[in-house]
Amino acid sequence: MNTKELKEEVRVNENDLQGEWSKQATLFLKYSLKMSRLIHDRDTYRREVANKILVSTDKISEAALTRMLDSDAKIVDYQLQINQHKNAVQSFEHKKKALEYETQLLIGGFFAEPKEKKPIRKGGK
């Protein structure tokens, strides 16, 4: 996962809320699909390794098999990537919430000029 690219994609551009909203769902889907693929690949690899261990070993406990699988470097790497993508997906949930609040502020006129324009008097009167 490219962390620099992710940071840029998660950043909210307050000057282009419409553009941010239009790409939000696509970015969420991108990272969600990648996470799903990684989970599938990890589980497939895990089954393959487990089958090889079971075929080559006469007797092995379930706990011992689990320990062997959990210490496999490729499975550990898959899990790291899955966790990173889970965090990315969660970041897009936070971005969505930020976009909702930014939009409410815009609608509410938070960034607008004062509604009543009174001339400023010099001298405090």
Image (cartoon, rainbow, N blue to C red):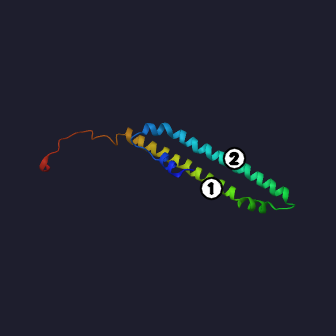
In the picture of the structure, the residue carrying the numbered disc 2 is 40
Which residue does the image show at 78% across and 55% down from the upper left?
50
From mark 2 to mark 1, how far is it between C-alphas? 14 Å
Q: Is residue 111 left or right of residue 100?
A: left
- Horizontal and vertical percent for residue 3? 53, 52
> Which secondary structure lies at badge 1?
helix
Which residue does the image show at 85% across and 56% down from the upper left?
55
**Marks 2 and 1: CB-CB under 8 Å?**
no
The disc label shown at residue 11, or none: none
10 Å neighbourhood of mark 1: few (<14), some, or many (≥20)? Answer: few
Q: Earlier in the sequence, mark 2 or mark 1?
A: 2
Residue reaching furthest to the right:
58
- Horizontal and vertical percent for residue 110? 34, 43
10 Å neighbourhood of mark 2: few (<14), some, or many (≥20)? Answer: few
Front residue of 101/30: it is 30
Which residue does the image show at 85% across and 60% down from the upper left?
57
Which residue does the image show at 79% across and 60% down from the upper left?
62
Q: Is residue 120 above or below residue 49?
A: above
In the picture of the structure, the residue carrying the numbered disc 1 is 80
Q: Is residue 110 left or right of residue 27?
A: left
Q: Amino acid at mark 2?
A: His
Q: Amino acid at mark 1?
A: Leu
- Horizontal and vertical percent for residue 77? 65, 56
Front residue of 123/84: it is 84
Q: Is residue 110 left or right of residue 48?
A: left
> Which secondary structure lies at badge 2?
helix
